Image (spheres, rainbow, N blue to C red):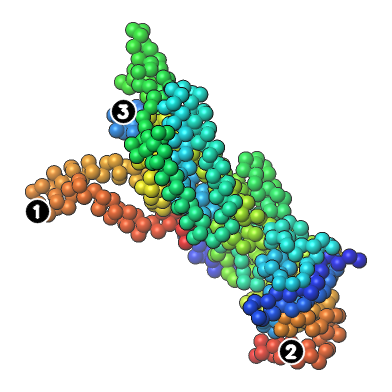
Amino acid sequence: MTPSLRTENLTIRFGGHAAVNGVTCAFAPGELTVIVGPNGAGKTTWFNLVSGQLRPTEGRIFKDDTDITGLSPSARAGMGIGRAFQLTSLFPKLSVEENVRLAVQARSGAGFRIFSRASTLTGLRDEAREFLRKTRLEQVATLPASALPHGDQRKLEVAMLMAMQPDIYMFDEPTAGMSVDEAPAILDLVAEIKKDNSKTILLVEHKMDVVRALADRIVVLHNGELIADGKPDEVMALPLVRQIYLGVGQEEAA
Amino acid sequence: MTSQTRPNDTVSAPAMSRARVGRMIVYGAVGLVGLALLFAPFLFPDVRSQEVAARICVFVVLVASYDLLLGYTGIVSFAHTMFFGLGAYGTAIALKNMGPGADAILLGGGAGVLAALVLALLIGMLSLRVKAIFFAMVTLAAASVMMVLASQLSQFTGGEDGMTYQVPRIFSPAYKLLTDADGKTLRLFDVALNGKIALYYFVFLSSLILFLVMARIVASPLGTVLEAIRENELRAEAIGYKVVVYRTAIFCIAAVIAALAGILRAMWLKYTGPEVALSFAIMIDILLMVVIGGMGTLVGAVIGVVIMSLAQFYLRDLMEIAAEATSAIPLLPDLLNPERWLLWLGVLFILLVYFFPAGIAGTLMGKGGAK
């Protein structure tokens, strides 16, 4: 099967420091990959390279065998690469519904319709409501995004990503800063996307115990390099991974 | 309290209802202004009030189009009077050289609007991808060049003196719009229905249409994208909007609307010069009006323009009255001397900004682009 996403020798250097160093890997549709590694391992940087916020020093990125290395973030989003951010990145003064509607609208290409009929707008709005219902945010649809508590803001991040309906979902620590009670709601949403079996899902997550059941595959980054890639049980059994990763896990648990 | 209740509901409920009352006040005030402008020739028939009313109409369009940039999209530009001036000068030069006719207005105004569009496109494409501060500098440079050109090419523009010209006959005070039985200009409520009235309503209706077009833009999907770009440019790009393209588009739209307002200004005044159509003083007025009215609200433009225009035209009269009334008291008449009107205008601005940090409409409605 053609991989839906592939990076080839992907490298970025900031001065002399290689934040991501020669990462080559491919991801198939229907596959959920959890990307782990200690802080500073290059996970978010690798995400930024794939979604286009950063340009690589070396290497290439392919979406369905199309080279997208030189494309802008908006062009990549248009090709079906969707991204949720680790540090919640919303439109704070716009309402929750408008936040989601913007994502719906970007996909449907209605952004430039100045004199669109009200019914078109209602269509966009209904679709946005649908994603709010899925993420259980309909109650707060009219509030400005900045008024939401942290957990709901994280849900809104996910709702916006879902509304983009990408082929490739990139979640950057979707449960960061959430309580143990709140985290499952987000992971349920991820699980629902996975049911589709046609989407590629990439998930950066520290709480290994919570995502382990979802993961088809684990990729370990360390100092910008890919050091392990395989089935969850195999990867987690590797001595190097136990040393690097579980060390971090224990610190967090403490 | 049920388990469904969120902590924010209790906090935001009074804020929401306050915003609703505020919105009613703002829309009520704007509606009143609209009615006053609609009946201005009959309510305030003296010449000075006519000037104020027409100026308010034109500036509402100019300031609202600037709000599309500053308030909605977060673009800081100092070139807005340049586009305004292009419309005004295009119309003025054509009227002067071709004589007073509709063809001159269409040709000259059209050329001015086209020039504004092309310039906006060039500036936008070349520099809207750079940082906001650099873009502001580029617009400042462009506006300065345009002012030097207007002053130096005096054989076309009249230089610093500007130029006067005639407008089509239907808009001249001598034209009888309607005649009574004796063949004289028909009077309605004691107001002569002459060409001046026709010109006022041309300005009023054109301004109204342009304002409604802008209201439609901000309520459309495009309007939400512009706000999204202001709020979080990176995220807007990440969900699939080409930010540079949207910024350039709204910069061009605002430039064209400003140029159209310039045409109205040139037609109403029958005079165009740097002072009325191109100077930085106008740019500063526009900025103050947007900030006082409320950025990112559009209706704030109406409130800002009305307050500023009334203050600029009538504060001196008011102070003269106040100075006379207090002439028996020491010091006060000196403070209230009409020559110190700019001081009091400054005090008024400071008070407005202090009590309405997001502008009058922005603060009352609980929204707006001010941080």
Residue at which label 2 appears: A244
Disc 1 chain ID: B
Q: Amino acid at mark 1?
A: Pro
Q: Amino acid at mark 2?
A: Ile
Viewer can see residue A222: yes
How far separated are the C-alphas under marks 2 and 1?
83 Å
Disc 2 chain ID: A
Between residue A239 and residue B34, name the one nearer to us.
A239
Q: What residue is at 65 percent from the left and 64 percent from the top?
A: A156
Viewer can see residue B56: no
Between residue B141 and residue A176, name the one nearer to us.
B141
* Placement of A213 over or under B34, stated as above or below: below
**Looking at the image, which residue sits at the far right?**
A1
Q: What residue is at 83 percent from the left and 80 percent from the top?
A: A229
Q: Secondary structure at mark 2?
A: helix
How many residues crowd around disc 3 within 10 Å: few (fewer than 14), some, or many (20 or more)?
Answer: some
Query: Which dot marks residue B330?
Result: 1
Q: What residue is at 35 percent from the left and 9 percent from the top?
A: B183
* Placement of A197 over or under B196, stated as above or below: below
Residue at which label 3 appears: B45
On the rendered image, what quadrant is the N terminus of chain A found in?
Answer: bottom right
Between residue B227 and residue B74, name the one nearer to us.
B74
Q: Is residue A145 left or right of residue B329?
A: right
Q: Secondary structure at mark 3?
A: loop
Q: Amino acid at mark 3?
A: Pro
Instruction: Respond whether the residues carrying marks 1 and 3 are from the same subunit.
Output: yes
* Placement of A183 over or under B253, stated as above or below: below
Q: Secondary structure at mark 1?
A: loop
Q: What residue is at 30 percent from the left and 29 percent from the top?
A: B47
